[in-house]
Image (cartoon, rainbow, N blue to C red):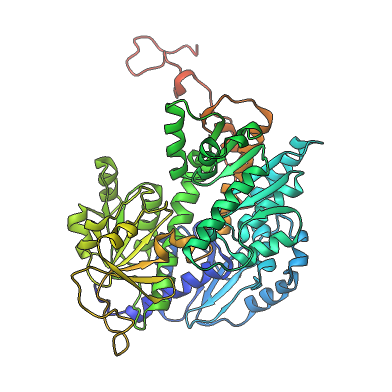
């Protein structure tokens, strides 16, 4: 770890950025911010990080400002935020009125001294209403779905991480005239949100409505809920990781008598679907929503990048008495697909030094040209202060990889699948684990004879092994609220575009892509909601996408006559 002489200043900037995102579960990239900070060095550092994250900086008097940064939270912005608080519902009974609407979310004000003022309420109902208000693109597509359903009532099952945004999305489906059921695993559910959603009576909730303890209990509950949501007999399914599609094709095949199509949300879920299709075992059409440009280029790259980096820092900061910030730390990012690219981008914007570990030489070369290092795991892992697995591949960091890590190295998963970190293999190999702080577990090799850091005398003693965050699950949804509202607005709208196609078109079994027209539909709605616009000039359509008539070329002997 490289020590910065201006470490306290950079740490204050980092904490302010994290607070701004966390206060409303907002996406900084694509947002509009003002910076009114007295200290010139702090102002410069803040502006640099914001710019590298894709934030536009304007004058604080601009009414479009979404994030107002200052020395402390005082003055005008506070009054705007206080007035907006009266709009947030305060109980579960108010959630049915939390319909999607297009008016923008009010600004969040953050001071570098740690003060913050946010308009979002703290209970589940208020968070659901806030998320609904922040998803105008989803609202536009939900209106189109309502028109398409007509008098029909399609039965739609949703399998996604259950937090406020997902709850708002399922309520939008219900408001669009659909019968809706929601499944979510114990490890991916906010039980307060689940209870608030169930209380509306609009969605059948197959998820824990109260905290669950014990791995055995959680696994049994997940299996029962997964079976029950398929027994609910959905016609259409929005899946995450293709777990329910695979369950329906293996142990619950009766579900295929009613389930006629699905849409898949994730990279890790699309991969097994292609395998099933290649072997002729996929019996329904599935649209790979993950592969749409309006999903991967924003959700995977920007949303997951920001939320995972910030979640790592939030957990690490809370667990460490002398946390010094991301600036100057060395990060090893395993995998340089869209998620890995996003993680590298946002960690670097906070001052981290990045080394990418990538098996694909082309992607490794891209990492170099993005300004990062590219090296082998053998070279990168021993030097890393933070290791983030961003592959979606089983046992990306195996026992041998863990053995290369130095004590105190922070390990997390971005995105993630089950067992992306080989924790069960570590236990089988004799490694021991001790929880040292909430969502932080120290893993020690069998040849380590030191007492776990949580049991040693004194405060702030160095750990004896690497520190795994969020039990090896996706750190952004296991230890935080998942991806920001704005990026999930795009993802949910893309899911709705897929549902519209599945409702109006008969597709053969197999994996299908979302059409370019559907991507454009979503993107135009998002641009309109965000105050942008694409050039209205229609593209010239030529066979093969040629930019000019084929007979117009450089070496013509006779001039072109305008044919």
* In the foreground, 13 or 549: 13
Q: Is residue 19 visible?
A: yes
Residue 84 place in picture, x, y as percent: 71, 71
Q: Is residue 176 left or right of residue 559?
A: right
Residue 425 percent coordinates (x, y)? 30, 57
Let me know if residue 130 appears in the view: no
- x, y (%) of residue 512? 52, 30
What residue is rendered at 44% in x and 43% in y? 267
Identify the residue at horizontal 23%, vertical 64% (top origin). Answer: 405
Residue 16 coordinates in the image, percent (x, y): 47, 74
Q: Quadrant of residue 81?
A: bottom right
> Viewer-proximal residue, 255 or 75?
255
Q: Classify the position of the N terminus by image quarter.
A: bottom left
156 to the left or right of 10? right
Single out the residue that lies furthest toward the bottom: 458
Task: Tell me what residue is drawn at x 28 percent, y 70 percent.
Answer: 328
Residue found 18% across the figure and 70% down from its top: 447
Image quarter of residue 201: bottom right
Q: Is residue 497 left or right of residue 480?
A: right
Q: Residue furthest right?
A: 151
The residue sitting at the top extreme is 558
Using residue 393 as the reference point, say whether residue 226 is left or right of it.
right
For the residue pair 283 and 22, the one nearer the viewer reads as 283
Above or below 140: residue 551: above
How many dots with numbers? 0
Residue 519 figure quarter: top right
């Amino acid at each position: 770890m490289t020590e910065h002489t201006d470490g306290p200043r950079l740490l204050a900037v980092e904490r302010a950025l994290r607070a701004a995102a966390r206060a409303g579960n907002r996406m900084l990239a694509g947002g509009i911010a003002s910076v009114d900070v007295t200290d010139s060095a702090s102002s410069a550092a803040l502006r640099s990080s914001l710019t590298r994250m894709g934030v536009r900086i304007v004058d604080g008097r601009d009414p479009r400002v979404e994030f107002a940064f200052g020395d402390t939270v005082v003055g005008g912005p506070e009054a705007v935020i206080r007035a907006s608080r009266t709009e947030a519902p305060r109980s579960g009974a108010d959630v049915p009125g939390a319909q999607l609407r297009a008016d923008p979310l009010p600004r969040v004000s953050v001071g570098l001294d740690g003060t913050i003022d946010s308009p979002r309420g703290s209970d589940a109902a208020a968070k659901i209403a806030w998320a609904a208000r922040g998803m105008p693109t989803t609202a536009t597509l939900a209106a189109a779905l309502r028109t398409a359903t007509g008098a029909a009532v399609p039965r739609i099952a949703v399998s996604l991480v259950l937090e406020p945004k997902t709850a708002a999305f399922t309520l939008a489906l219900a408001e669009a005239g659909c019968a809706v059921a929601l499944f979510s695993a114990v490890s991916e559910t906010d039980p307060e949100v689940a209870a608030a959603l169930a209380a509306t009576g609009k969605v059948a909730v197959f998820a824990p409505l109260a905290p669950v303890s014990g791995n055995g209990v959680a696994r049994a509950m997940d299996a029962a809920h997964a079976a029950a949501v398929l027994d609910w007999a959905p016609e259409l399914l929005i899946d995450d990781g293709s777990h329910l599609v695979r369950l329906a094709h293996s142990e619950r095949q009766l579900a295929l008598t009613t389930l006629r199509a699905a849409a898949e949300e994730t990279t890790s879920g699309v991969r097994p679907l292609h395998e099933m299709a290649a072997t002729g075992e996929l019996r329904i059409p599935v649209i790979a929503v993950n592969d749409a440009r309006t999903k991967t280029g924003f959700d995977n790259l920007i949303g997951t990048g920001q939320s995972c980096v910030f979640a790592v820092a939030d957990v690490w900061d809370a667990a460490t008495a002398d946390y010094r910030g991301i600036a100057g730390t060395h990060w090893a990012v395993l995998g340089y697909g869209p998620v890995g690219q996003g993680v590298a981008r946002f960690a670097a914007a906070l001052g981290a030094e990045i080394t990418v570990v990538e098996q694909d030489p082309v992607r490794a070369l891209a990492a170099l040209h993005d300004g990062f290092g590219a090296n082998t795991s053998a070279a990168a892992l021993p030097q890393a202060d933070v290791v983030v697995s961003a592959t979606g591949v089983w046992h990306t960091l195996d026992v041998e990889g863990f053995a290369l890590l130095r004590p105190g190295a922070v390990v997390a998963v971005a995105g993630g699948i089950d067992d992306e970190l080989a924790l069960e293999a570590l236990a089988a190999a004799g490694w021991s684990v001790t929880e040292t702080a909430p969502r932080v577990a120290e893993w020690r090799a069998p040849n380590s004879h030191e007492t776990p850091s949580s049991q040693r005398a004194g405060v702030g003693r160095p750990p004896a092994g690497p520190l795994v965050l969020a039990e090896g699950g996706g750190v952004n949804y296991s230890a935080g609220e998942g991806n920001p509202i704005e990026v999930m607005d795009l993802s949910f709208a893309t899911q709705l575009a897929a549902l519209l196609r599945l409702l109006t078109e008969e597709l053969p079994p197999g994996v299908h892509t979302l059409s370019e027209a559907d991507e454009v539909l979503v993107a135009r709605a998002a641009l309109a909601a965000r105050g942008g616009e694409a050039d209205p000039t229609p593209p010239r359509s030529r066979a093969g996408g040629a930019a000019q008539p084929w007979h117009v070329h450089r070496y013509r002997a006779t001039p072109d006559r305008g044919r």
